[in-house]
Image (cartoon, rainbow, N blue to C red):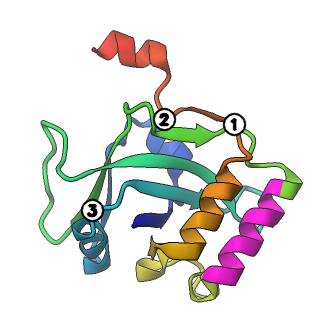
Amino acid sequence: MDVFYYWKNHEQDIKAGRLGHFASTSEKLQEMADGQPEFIWVFKTPQGHKGELQLIGRLRWLPQPLKGFHREAGQFYLHYDARHADSMLFSDSDSASALAATTHWVSHHFPHMRSANFKGVHAQEALRGQPLKELKALAGGFSGRPLIPVDVVADAG
């Protein structure tokens, strides 16, 4: 099992260094973590492309938070390793054809998420079976780059 996660503010989160977890007041996020996914696949609506979706990356799931993490009351968390070599952003998933393919895939497999505009519990979903297989094939056509550049990881290490 993997997880589909709609990451609305990914650019702001990355710039602000808010990495390593997603938080929600929904227990659904905890249910996803309890399923021990391998990856969290992250999506967004690209600016100026209302109604379209972009697969922005794949993040390596973590069963526990990294050292120094502080939980907030009433929040559920899904953790990931931003420094793992398998945690990447797709650098060419924003072309017109990539957006069309991603939007079609989501519309076909998760129409309830789109109709709810990816709000609340509709921003995350378990990925299994054929939808996951198709997503991996779709992502296989994109180039990836580390979520955190190697020089930043080396400086932090």
**Which element is circle 2 on?**
helix
In space, the residues marked 3 and 2 are separated at their CA atoms by 28 Å
Vertical side of 19 occupied by 124: above or below:
below
As drawn, the label of residue 143 is 1
Which residue type carries mark 1?
Ser
**Which element is circle 1 on?**
loop
Locate residue 98: give its quadrant.
Answer: bottom right
Which-is-in-front pick, marks 1 and 2?
1
Which residue type carries mark 2?
Lys
In space, the residues marked 1 and 2 are separated at their CA atoms by 21 Å
The residue that mark 3 highlights is 36
Sort mark 2 into few (<14), some (14-19) or many (20+) by Cα contacts within 10 Å. Answer: few
Q: Return the disc, 3 or 2, that comes first in the chain's sequence.
A: 2
The image position of residue 9, as x and y in percent, is 52, 54
Locate residue 130: give its quadrant.
Answer: bottom right
Lateral position of residue 88 relative to residue 3, left or right: right
Stretch in magenta: 98-109
Q: Return the disc, 1 or 2, that comes first in the chain's sequence.
A: 2
Query: Relative to the observer, which residue lies in front, 28 or 46?
Result: 28
The image position of residue 112, as x and y in percent, is 58, 89
Lateral position of residue 28 relative to residue 147, left or right: left
Q: Residue at x 44, y 47 (%)?
A: 59
Q: Residue at x 60, y 80 (%)?
A: 117
Q: Return the disc, 1 or 3, that comes first in the chain's sequence.
A: 3
